[in-house]
């Protein structure tokens, strides 16, 4: 698991995620889509109702990260 605060370009270790029911359903559905398609370099977005907050989700495999941006590759490899 890798978590990046994109605004500050920092790796995070602990996150509390509070979701509404609708946001949780959207998260579940997006994860299900990513898992069913098994497209490792794909991603999805979950937004709050005002589009002020966003989660970006992606699946990865340690040995298959070439499709990601360089910053994301560094995060996967070094967790920084």
Image (cartoon, rainbow, N blue to C red):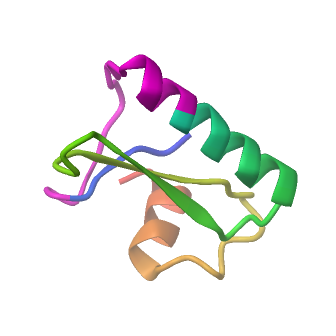
What range is drawn magenta here?
Answer: 7-25
Q: Magenta stretch: residue 16 in it?
A: yes
Q: Magenta stretch: residue 26 in it?
A: no
Query: Could you tell me which residue is drawn at 74 percent across and 64 percent down?
Result: 40
Query: Could you tell me which residue is drawn at 44 percent across and 59 percent down?
Result: 75
Residue 60, how many percent across, how many down? 68, 57
Left-right relation of 37 to 26: right
Residue 21, how many percent across, how many down? 44, 18
Q: Quadrant of residue 61?
A: bottom right
Q: In what quadrant of the picture does the N terminus appear?
A: top right
Q: How many marks?
A: 0
Query: Could you tell me which residue is drawn at 85 percent across and 51 percent down?
Result: 36
Q: Nearer the viewer, residue 67 or 56?
A: 56
Q: Is residue 4 above or below residue 41?
A: above
Residue 16, how many percent across, how many down? 31, 19
State the predominant SS element of the stretch in magenta. Answer: loop
Q: Is residue 75 above or below residue 79?
A: below
Q: Is residue 12 above or below residue 38?
A: above
Query: Could you tell me which residue is drawn at 18 percent across and 46 percent down?
Result: 50
Left-right relation of 31 to 16: right
Q: Nearer the viewer, residue 75 or 20?
A: 20
Left-right relation of 15 to 7: right
Q: In what quadrant of the picture does the C terminus appear?
A: bottom left
Residue 27, how many percent across, how many down? 54, 36
């Amino acid at each position: 698991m890798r978590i990046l605060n994109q605004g500050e370009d920092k790796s995070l270790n602990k996150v509390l995620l509070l979701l509404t029911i609708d946001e949780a359903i959207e998260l579940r559905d997006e994860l299900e889509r990513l898992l069913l398609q098994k497209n490792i370099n794909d991603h999805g977005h979950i937004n709050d109702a005002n589009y002020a907050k966003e989660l970006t989700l992606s699946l990865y495999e340690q040995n298959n990260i070439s499709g990601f941006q360089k910053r994301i590759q560094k995060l996967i490899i070094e967790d920084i």
